[in-house]
Image: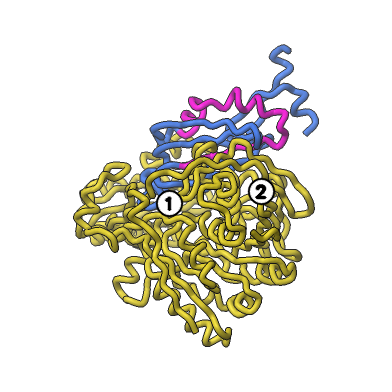
Amino acid sequence: MPKESLLIGCGAGFAGDRLDAALPVVRELIAQGKPACLIFETLAERTLALAQLRRRQDVEGGYLTTLAELLAPVLADCVAHRIPIIGNFGAANPAAAARRILQLATTLDCGPIKVMAVTGDDLLGRMRADELLAMPFSPPTQIARSSLVSANVYLGAQGIAQALAAGADVVVTGRVADPALALGPLVHHFGWRWDDWDRLAAGVLAGHLLECGAQVTGGYFADPGVKDVPNLAAVGYPIAEIAADGALVIGKPSGTGGMVSERTVKEQILYEIHDPSAYLTPDVTLDLSGVTVEQVGPDRVRVTGAAGKPRPATLKGTVCFDGGWLGEGEISYAGPNCRARGLLAIDILRERLSALALAVERHFDLIGVASVFNDADGRWLDQCPAREIDDVRVRLAVSGAERRDVERALQEVEALYTAGPAGGGGVRTHVTPLMNSTSVFVPREAFAPQIETLEA
Amino acid sequence: MTAEDFVDVPLHQIAHARTGDKGNRINVAVFCYDPAVYPYLAEQLTEAKVLACYGHRAPSAVTRYLVPNLAACNFVIDDVLAGGVNNSLCLDRHGKGLSYLLLAMTIRLPRQCVAGR
């Protein structure tokens, strides 16, 4: 078992993340010269369903659309310095993503490279749609077969560890539990056993802290005058250093912006956590109730006390299905009495939409007064105190099964130019497909990961 | 201590917070800047008060987890996103900004806890 610690850098925390974040991370990993790997997390709940829709249009599509842009700046350096890349950017088509990476490596003249795709997360590859739709969903959901878009289980870290053991330079996955992107390389590097719950818990905690990128290094944190963060425009993405016993320090590349403090790390420890004593992952149940943080240097925070309990017997899957259409339309009012003019516009829209009797759900906001905190019935807007304000934007959001009903509703926002209150300007409308989702739980034994190898 | 020894302060002044989302559920984790005021948060930030704070969104339940090792309270708020990230009509479908609604609450603290800030 190697004694030397492993560095894990994170190059992206979601599909829309900065495309140039990985470069400073890789430079730091090379400069430190220790065993290292680089992870990319780009697959949110909804992202995979949208990718599945792209794959239906194009058999070689369905992976992260920005894959080549994301990898081009770092791929050659990572291959040359033996820094494996692990990413769930395969989305709905890991094998096609692997082919695209091989092609990119050839273009960039990376030399010999082994790209491995880990699959097996697609439920519809393992059972028929009618079998799936007969299973109990949580929450209980009725799904028409024709509206089913995607169904994927969250795989654990085993497939990633296997691929690394087989010498992968790049491991491409579809749906895996986000922390598995870090746990896989840790298990491979240190040879941790799959029932060494405390070690696995430390690895999952490392992955949990890394997987949202800059959210642990000062992003999603700055509050001027209260929680100031230097130079977010060049925020450094995180690098974790993990020792064989699971000891964990979070840091970031030298010369980058942002910061790693006890506060930034604490906020991320509880991010998307429900019961802190039982964070369920496919590989281990993580108990955070003894975790503490300590600043051990500039932009370096040690995290200790992760405890593990046995993994759940089942794997969770997300089932996505067509949810109709979402439409949003907005119009602005400014200057004297703008709040009243905005409220009048909302009243007019309510009356028009009621008279049209369209089959749409509707939601009104008055941006500048009540939007982020607002509710569909406007209870929040109604109780907002009248304050001096000189710029408001009316927002109508509608959803419905039929696109034409949604578009018809938005047309009423545009008509406010001439038939609405004084001084209304800046109308924008757009329509996008909606995706619904529900969860399903399946026995883990039926979902061993599969691995496909491509070499050049 | 008498009533005069206490003062109401905005939570935003003494604590920071972050929202995370899963489906139609969010968690809002609240952290004290000064661990010395943590007992006051644990005493006053009850599930009922947080449920009322988000009441206009009609959440179905609030569950509180105390996390003393991080001087934090973690609130899990069910059915607060009007459908969740996939199909909510809310402007902020993830509820990213909803931690700041909680930070707008006030907390009653002994005057001496606030004086040094």
Q: Which residue is mark 1?
A: A394
Element class at badge 2: helix
Residue A69, image x and y in percent?
53, 76
Residue A264 — which label? 2
Q: Looking at the image, can residue A218 be seen?
A: no
Chain B colour is blue
Residue shown at the point (29%, 48%) measured from the top left: A361
Total number of numbered labels? 2
Residue shown at the point (67%, 62%) measured from the top left: A236
Q: Earlier in the sequence, mark 1 or mark 2?
A: 2
Q: Quadrant of the N terminus of chain A?
A: bottom right
Q: Is residue A6 above or below residue A198?
A: below
Residue shown at the point (28%, 60%) measured from the top left: A126
Q: Chain of mark 2?
A: A
A190 vs A433, left or right, is: right
- State which chain is coloured yellow: A
Q: Is residue B72 above or below residue A185?
A: above
